[in-house]
Image (cartoon, rainbow, N blue to C red):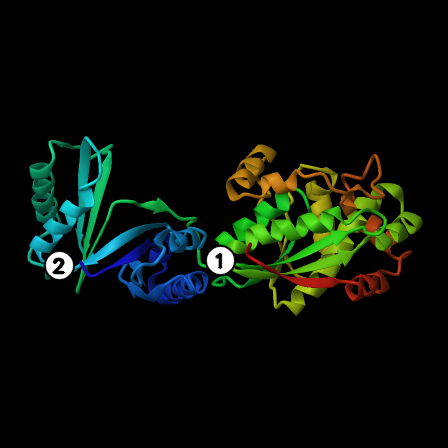
Amino acid sequence: MLAQCIVVHYHELALKGRNRPRFVARLVANLRRVTKGLGVAGIRALPGRVVLDLADRVDVEAACRQVADVFGVANYSPARRLDRDLETLRTAVSALIADRTFNSFRMSARRGDKLYPMTSMQLNEELGRHVQSLRPVKVDLSEPELTIHVEVLEREALLYTDKRPGPGGLPVGISGNVAVLLSGGIDSPVAAYRMMQRGCRVSFVHFHSHPFLSKASQEKAVELAEQLVRHQGRAVLHLVPFGELQRQVVIGAPVPLRVVLYRRLMMRIAAELALKERAGALVTGESLGQVASQTLENLMVINDAAPLLVLRPLIGMDKQEIIDQAKRIGTYEISILPDQDCCQLFVPKHPSTKTTLEQVRRAERALPIDEMVKEAVAGVVTQRVEAR
């Protein structure tokens, strides 16, 4: 028995053809970053898997908790590295099941090295008979109580039982940078998560109305960002003062158009900040038809003000689907905390749902739009958020 390790399997990366080495290299770099200081002696990219070699007397579960949040990981397992000879494998399997109680099992042996003298089926049969010589248990290929995995590689074998699901997706950073308009609500944190899962590194832009409203929404934005950045380590959060701009819109624009004008201003300001982070797109938590500003007509008018590509990963999801995912990723309980965000300030009772470009452009001619954007950008407070 050589040493303990963690075996990481990926799925989507394996479909990348000639680009696969670049994706795997990014995954390895992200795994190295999150496990730094946890006793990982080395990380090796092997065919179809990544192996994290652990030093002696390391807290394996602490390392596993970090691996569990890394996008690109389909599943991972605490494992043992072994010599490949059959007697060593038998001995290791005996030790593995010594303190386990189970009535059914399955052997899942895979021969990664085609020069190994036994086929995968022969290994399954040989090691399966060995288990049954030690325990009166039955083989169950469909729903076993215990699955014993053996992977025979070129220079070693890996033995494990506990196959734990990872978050899947692509390694963060492989798809570029995006800026997420992060409110204190349920939707935008889910949108940020989904973009990270597609390999994007995110920065956050939060619009607040302090001092017209309390700082509660800013505090929530920080807490949400801290929850999300465990998938990428750290991020920048821009806190944008928006209350004064809303006041100017209220004074100078027709009441039904206020919401769309707010959103167009947000797009312009967020784009200015995104470019500083070398982001190639803006991301929102908008879902088609969910509120007045999210009709097809209004979304088209809002897009017109954005100098960058606007991505809406939740556009076809209903509210319950979004809530369910928010609960799974740990942002829901934060999002439902009471706060006062800028969406509650100066919002008309009956906003326009079918705004036209002609209407908003005419309204914006009465406003010093460029100066308003510069004013907001100048007042931004930027902070770095670390994974908590």
Q: CA distance from mark 1 to mark 2?
A: 36 Å
Snapshot quadrant of residue 375:
bottom right
Snapshot quadrant of residue 386:
bottom right
For label 2, the SS is loop
Q: Which residue is at a point 57% across and 50% down the rendered structure image?
A: 227
Q: Are marks 1 and 2 in contact (CB under 8 Å)?
A: no
What's the amino acid at mark 2? Arg
Decide: few, some or many residues near mark 1? Use Cα within 10 Å; few <14, some 14-19, many ≥20: many
Instruction: Indicate left or right for 261 with 280 as reference.
Output: right
Q: Is 133 rendered above or below residue 236? A: above
Q: Is 320 rendered above or below residue 363? A: above
Name the spot of residue 207 as percent of width and height, x first: 74, 53
Instruction: Indicate left or right for 179 with 77 as reference.
Output: right
Q: Which residue is at a point 93% across and 49% down the rendered structure image?
A: 251
Camera-nearest label, 1 or 2: 2
Decide: few, some or many residues near mark 2? Use Cα within 10 Å; few <14, some 14-19, many ≥20: some
Q: Which residue is at a point 80% across and 47% down the rendered structure image?
A: 214
Snapshot quadrant of residue 286:
top right
| Rendered image: mark on residue 199 | 1
For label 1, the SS is loop
Residue closest to the eye, 347 or 85? 85
Residue closest to the eye, 269 or 36? 36
Name the spot of residue 15 as percent of width and height, x first: 35, 56
Give the position of the C terminus as an image quadrant.
Answer: bottom right
Give the position of the N terminus as an image quadrant.
Answer: bottom left
Q: Is 384 rendered above or below residue 221? A: below
**Mark 2 lies on residue:** 84
What's the amino acid at mark 1? Gly
Name the spot of residue 6 as percent of width and height, x first: 31, 56
Name which of mark 1 and mark 2 comes first in the sequence.
2
Instruction: Indicate left or right for 282 with 81 as reference.
Output: right
